[in-house]
Amino acid sequence: EAGVAQSPRYKIIEKRQSVAFWCNPISGHATLYWYQQILGQGPKLLIQFQNNGVVDDSQLPKDRFSAERLKGVDSTLKIQPAKLEDSAVYLCASSLAPPRGGGETQYFGPGTRLLVL
Amino acid sequence: GEDVEQSLFLSVREGDSSVINCTYTDSSSTYLYWYKQEPGAGLQLLTYIFSNMDMKQDQRLTVLLNKKDKHLSLRIADTQTGDSAIYLCAEAGYGGKLTFGTGTRLQVTL
């Protein structure tokens, strides 16, 4: 079974530029998550999708970050404009079904490492 | 709010047991997870425990949960150099949202 795919793996941009990340979840997984992991910290949830609808985006900085999952499969996360503090690893994860009290395992992709100069 | 804390670093000798500790604050957490993160890789789920359990064993891994003290531990028996990585504790709260600790870097020496 193929895992969660992400691209690009690395990206270097200058502040105020735009960047987009792509995620392809495990086939058949209805729930998709984007996490931000700053160096030395644990991952922090940015947004959670259930099929193509947003379940939780309370931690997403909506003035600069946006995400979509138009057909309920692939997802893109965009940052526009980027700031220095956005330097982090952006992890995508998917799970089979809506979490019921946390019982559905989340499978993670390799992440995209972003450096903002 | 939820908060998960871990010590930053642990060093053990190959063949010894490693014990990685975690404390959490959300008493309504239903599941608690241990993930392994190697350089340049995503998170690999190692094991999880349901909140009504005290212990779970899976080959070299033993998870202990003290719900009263909100303390979770991961014991790795016969630690190998391939176990060197960052170990992240996470609690699943409302709606399954995961809150992670900062991770414990395990260094295995020969």
Image (cartoon, grey):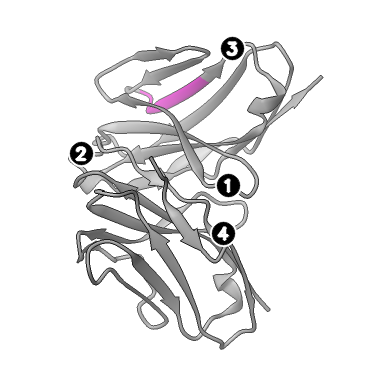
Report the amino acid beneath label 3: Ala
Q: Element type at marker 4?
A: loop
Between B12 and A105, the residue placed more toward the observer is: A105
Report the amino acid beneath label 4: Ile
The residue that label 4 is drawn on is A38
The residue that label 2 is drawn on is A101
Q: Nearer the viewer, mark 2 or mark 1?
A: 1
Q: Residue at x 39, y 43 (%)?
A: A107
The residue that label 1 is drawn on is B41
Quick one: label 4, few (<14), some, or many (20+) residues within 10 Å? some
Q: Main structural element of the magenta stretch: helix, strand or loop?
A: strand
Residue at the far front in the pictured view:
A1
Magenta stretch holds residue A81: no
Identify the magenta region.
B69-74
Residues under numbered marks 3 and 4 in contact, where contact means CB atoms less than 8 Å apart:
no
Report the amino acid beneath label 2: Gly
Report the amino acid beneath label 1: Ala
Quick one: label 1, few (<14), some, or many (20+) residues within 10 Å? some
Pointer 4 chain: A
